[in-house]
């Protein structure tokens, strides 16, 4: 995990409901909820400008966040973010408390490396997944899972079972049993690109 810290100030919210949320948004605040860890859910508000800036950083979605709630620091992860359908506005945030002794379930992004090498050889990298759902203790939460496609050729693919998950990190999907080994990426030959057989014929 990165040593970068993600800390945000929140205010406890007493008024709830559609009308109250609408008023908050007019005041450039974002309504939110914090739940989990066998504690009562609480309603929060954040400054909209702070959350707009935060959501531009990939770490906001993948790191354990520190929320300053009424003078108390609470560790949490972002579980859901709702946006206005056409305005650059956030409309609601869901956070889940983190308990150091309990595993959490969340999604982390897949970082693909070596794609340029594949495309130079006349093939196309087709992504089936861009993130993967994992289960782990908070201390083991990775920023991302790396997927190296640099040695792949047309017809090759990578599945969940091919990934190198960090120690203590499990795939939620694979935990469901056989038949859940999802394809992550496949390599397809461009129509104009010569096939392996064509290359052999040309060499003869």
Image (tube, helix red, strand yellow):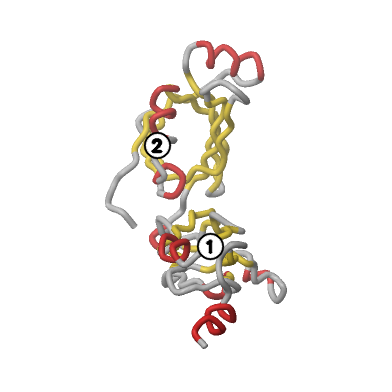
* Nearer to us in this view, 148 or 145: 148
Residue for point 48% across, 58% down = 110
Q: Residue 135 bears which disc, if any?
A: 1
Q: Would you name the residue on which mark 2 appears?
A: 67
Q: Position of residue 106 (x, y in %)?
A: 54, 54
* Count of picture labels: 2
Residue for point 53% across, 64% down = 123
- Within 10 angstroms of label 2, few (less than 14), some, or many (20 or more) residues? many
Q: Position of residue 72 (x, y in %)?
A: 37, 35
In the displayed structure, 193 sits above or below 61; it is below
Residue for point 54% across, 55% down = 131
The single residue placed furthest to the right in the displayed view is 179
In the displayed structure, 126 sits above or below 45; it is below
Q: Position of residue 154 (x, y in %)?
A: 57, 71
Query: Where, by quadrant of the figure, is residue 15 drawn?
Result: top right
Describe residue 195's horizontal placement relative to residue 110 as left or right. Answer: right
For marks 1 and 2, give the one nearer the viewer: 1
* Nearer to us in this view, 189 or 134: 189
- Sequence order check: which comes first, mark 1 or mark 2? 2
Q: Residue 38 bears which disc, if any?
A: none
Q: CA distance from mark 1 to mark 2?
A: 22 Å
């Amino acid at each position: 995990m990165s040593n970068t810290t993600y800390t945000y100030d929140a205010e406890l919210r007493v008024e709830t409901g559609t009308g109250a949320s609408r008023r908050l948004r007019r005041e450039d605040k974002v309504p939110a909820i914090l739940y989990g860890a066998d504690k009562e859910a609480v309603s929060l508000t954040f400054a909209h400008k702070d959350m707009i800036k935060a959501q531009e950083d990939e770490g906001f979605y993948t790191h354990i966040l520190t929320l300053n709630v009424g003078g108390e620091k609470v560790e949490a992860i972002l579980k859901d973010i709702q946006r206005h359908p056409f305005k650059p506005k956030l409309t609601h945030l869901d956070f889940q408390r983190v308990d150091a002794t309990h595993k959490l379930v969340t999604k982390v992004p897949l970082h693909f490396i070596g794609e340029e090498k594949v495309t130079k050889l006349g093939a196309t990298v087709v992504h089936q997944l861009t993130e993967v759902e994992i289960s782990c203790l908070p201390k083991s939460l990775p920023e991302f899972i790396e997927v190296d496609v640099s040695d792949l050729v047309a017809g090759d693919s990578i599945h969940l079972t091919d990934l190198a998950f960090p120690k203590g990190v499990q795939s939620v999907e694979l935990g469901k049993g056989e038949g859940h080994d999802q394809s992550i990426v496949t390599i397809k030959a461009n129509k104009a690109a010569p096939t392996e057989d064509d290359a052999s014929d040309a060499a003869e």
